[in-house]
């Protein structure tokens, strides 16, 4: 099984957009129960909560070659449910086990969201007060003195040639290194997928551009006007 999480996130984001919700406001109720259930599960799977936790777990399962837990949202999306089978058919004993996909194209936002959060951690830590920011003297361009040097009064004083300086936040660097390691593992998963490239279609895709808000507003206004006319015409039929 192969999955392109980038495409999945783009499709779900489009279906959840303001313009689609406006256009579909009167028609969401016409979506069948099964399709709507799949849509809800896909929204949960692509949710950005906790740095895209569901997708992170799915990617980690593929990297570690671990079978996905059938009770999680991830396995629900990645494996076929019994409702996918034609009427009158049931799964065999070996078909009920969720199988981890062999490859995928991870969503880059999974890693960027973590890097953004970790990057907000301080690079340096004041050894006398770890929760206070470390400042730099604008004139001397040196680190400011520790906030509470008295906490080390019971220790042997440092030689005059040495000054108490901030500590490097090793924890932050380890967190970032862990994300980079996961990113590299995700690249290996993506390298297993080889799609034939249609050069003409590829060039057209490169020229695709998003519509501006003004253009979307005009299109929606035209759609709303057409819908109003159809609604007014139907009772006379």
Image (cartoon, helix red, strand yellow):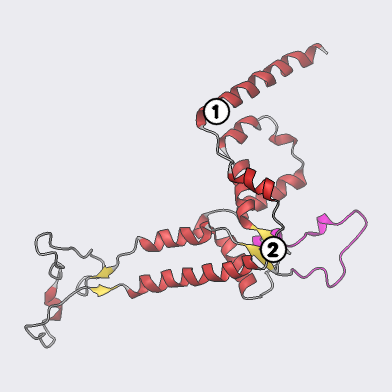
Image quarter where the C terminus lies is top right
In x, y percent, where is residue 199?
68, 50
- Which residue is outermost to the front? 199
Q: Are marks 2 and 1 in contact (CB under 8 Å)?
A: no
Residue at 10% x, 64% y is 140
Number of the front mark, 2 or 1: 2
Residue found at the far left of this picture: 160
Nearest the viewer among 147 and 189 is 189
Residue situated in front as seen by the camera: 2 or 232: 2
Residue under label 1? 215
* Identity of the residue drawn at 77% across and 60% down: 80
Q: Earlier in the sequence, mark 2 or mark 1?
A: 2
Residue closest to the eye, 29 or 177: 177
Which stretch appears magenta? 73-98
Nearest the eye: 154 or 48:
48
Who's the residue at 71% across and 45% down the image?
Answer: 36
- The residue under label 2 is 194
Residue 143 image position (x, y, % from top left): 16, 68
**Residue 130 - label:** none
User: Element under label 2?
Assistant: loop
Q: CA distance from mark 2 to mark 1?
A: 36 Å
Q: Main secondary structure of the magenta part?
A: loop
The residue tagged with tag 1: helix, strand or loop? helix
Residue projecting furthest to the top: 236
- Name the quadrant containing residue 148: bottom left
Q: From the top left corner, tell me how far across and down residue 66 is, in percent.
A: 66, 75
């Amino acid at each position: 099984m192969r999955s392109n999480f980038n495409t999945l996130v783009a499709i779900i984001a489009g279906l959840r957009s303001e313009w689609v919700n406006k256009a579909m406001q009167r028609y969401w109720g016409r979506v069948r129960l099964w399709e709507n259930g799949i849509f809800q599960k896909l929204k949960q799977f692509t949710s950005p909560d906790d740095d895209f936790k569901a997708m992170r777990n799915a990617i980690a399962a593929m990297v570690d070659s671990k079978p996905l837990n059938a009770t999680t949202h991830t396995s629900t999306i990645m494996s076929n449910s019994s409702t996918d089978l034609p009427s009158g058919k049931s799964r065999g004993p070996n078909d009920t086990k969720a199988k981890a996909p062999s490859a995928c194209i991870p969503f880059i936002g999974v890693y960027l969201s973590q890097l953004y959060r970790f990057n907000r951690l301080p690079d340096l830590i004041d050894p006398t007060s770890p929760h206070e920011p470390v400042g730099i003297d604008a004139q001397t361009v040196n680190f400011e003195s520790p906030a509470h040097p008295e906490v080390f009064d019971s220790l042997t004083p440092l030689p005059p040639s040495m000054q108490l300086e901030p500590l490097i936040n090793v924890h932050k660097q380890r967190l970032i290194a862990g994300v980079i390691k996961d990113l590299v593992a995700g690249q290996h998963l993506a390298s297993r997928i080889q799609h034939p490239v249609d050069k003409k279609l590829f060039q057209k895709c490169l020229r695709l551009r998003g519509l501006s808000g003004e253009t979307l507003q005009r299109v929606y206004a035209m759609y709303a006007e057409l819908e109003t006319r159809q609604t007014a015409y139907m009772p006379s039929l």
